[in-house]
Image (spheres, rainbow, N blue to C red):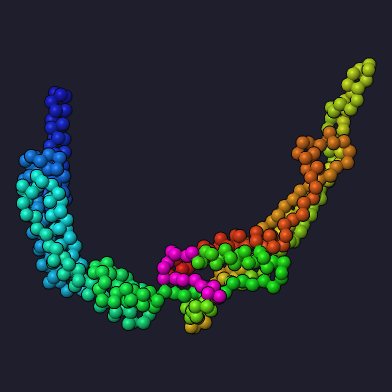
Amino acid sequence: MKTISRLRYFIYLSILIVGCTTGKNALQKGNYNTSVVKAVNRLQNSPQNKEAREVLASAYELSLAQHLRNIDEAKMSSDVLRWESVISAYEQINQLSNQINSCPACLTVVPNPQRFIAELADSKFKAAAVRYALGVQLLNAGDKLSARKAYQNFERTQQLYANYKDTQQKINEAYNAAVLKVVVQPARVNSEYYQEGNEYFQQRVSEWMNNYQYNKFVIFYDERQASKQRIVPDQIMRLRFDDFVVGQTYVKERVEKLAKDSVKIGESRASGPIYGTVKATLSIFDKKVASSGLLDMTVIDYNSNKVVRQRKLTGTYVWEDQWASYKGDERALTKHQLAISKRKEVMPPSPGALFVEFTKPIYSQLISEISSFYNNY
């Protein structure tokens, strides 16, 4: 009984697999395009497959009729973008034709698969005309949001019909009208001790902004670029250090009394090694040099002079050093204590280098803030 049950299962599975590969199941579900594709694939591998031939004949006629019906309905529609629906239907018909033409066995079933080359080209021209008109209308609205939509419509115009009228010129006009121009005023410091560190910070910010590409409708300019190109900004981003402290030094000394028992301190001819306690006084010095700053990022609308974004960004860097000295017997010290006792006090980095270090976390926060504000602006 189990053998019969297994046999029935494999027969059912085989029928199911054949139905899937010939496209019969897709045909029964009304997926005519899919059914045609599956039947074509089957006939390419098995040209005499009876079921696949029957499926192809039925599926192609039904698919063609469905697409032609969709085309007629789209043409009568009030949808302003109806020609793009027409294009989609023609393209699917032509794609089916290409698939059948690439399969010799299929051509014996569907000898002359229809193609609509001229009709497709005409539909693309009409769709491009609609997109172009929409773009012009939106561009004339005079605001940035409409200009962005205009840009998208002109791009679609070019995709539909290359070199339609002056589309490339309109794309450039729309982009220039849509783009947000942000002039960045760098943070300045008066002291020459920190000038190099500040220049490094500003250079990193400028490099990031010059390479910014996430939102193509936002462009950053430094003051020099803006002046040279005579840019009239939409926004001003002002960077300013509200406060910073570099090189605050703290030195802490702690003294430890050390003793270690059972240390060989001598030797006697009579009794051998002599063990006792060794002692030392260890002075450990911990030095910290702290640097920190507060950067104000303020974005101002150029026309209204209103603040549209403001953030306070903080950064801190602490440089540390440790050394020690001792008096007494070095055998009372651990290996670590002995090692630091051999170290000498190290000079901290220069003020400029310390400035760079505390601005690193500020830079990371600044980039994050700019990205979150402008990426989807």
Q: From the viewer's perspective, is 135 left or right of 100?
A: right
Instruction: Indicate whether 120 appears above or below 177.
Output: above
Q: From the viewer's perspective, is 17 left or right of 319?
A: left
Q: In x, y percent, where is residue 237?
A: 54, 74
Q: In x, y percent, where is residue 189?
A: 67, 71
Give whichever of 318, 162 is nearer the camera: 162
Instruction: Indicate whether 92 appears above or below 36.
Output: below
Image quarter of residue 105: top left
Q: In x, y percent, where is residue 171?
A: 33, 74
Magenta residue check for 24: no
The quarter of the rendered structure image containing the C terminus is: bottom left
Q: Residue furthest front?
A: 163
Instruction: Indicate whether 230 appears above or below 215.
Output: below
Residue at the (13%, 30%) spot, across then down: 8
Residue at the (10%, 41%) spot, across then down: 47
Q: From the viewer's perspective, is 194 left or right of 176?
A: right
Residue at the (77%, 57%) spot, across then down: 250
The quarter of the rendered structure image containing the N terminus is: top left
Region of the chain picked out in magenta, as a range: 211-225
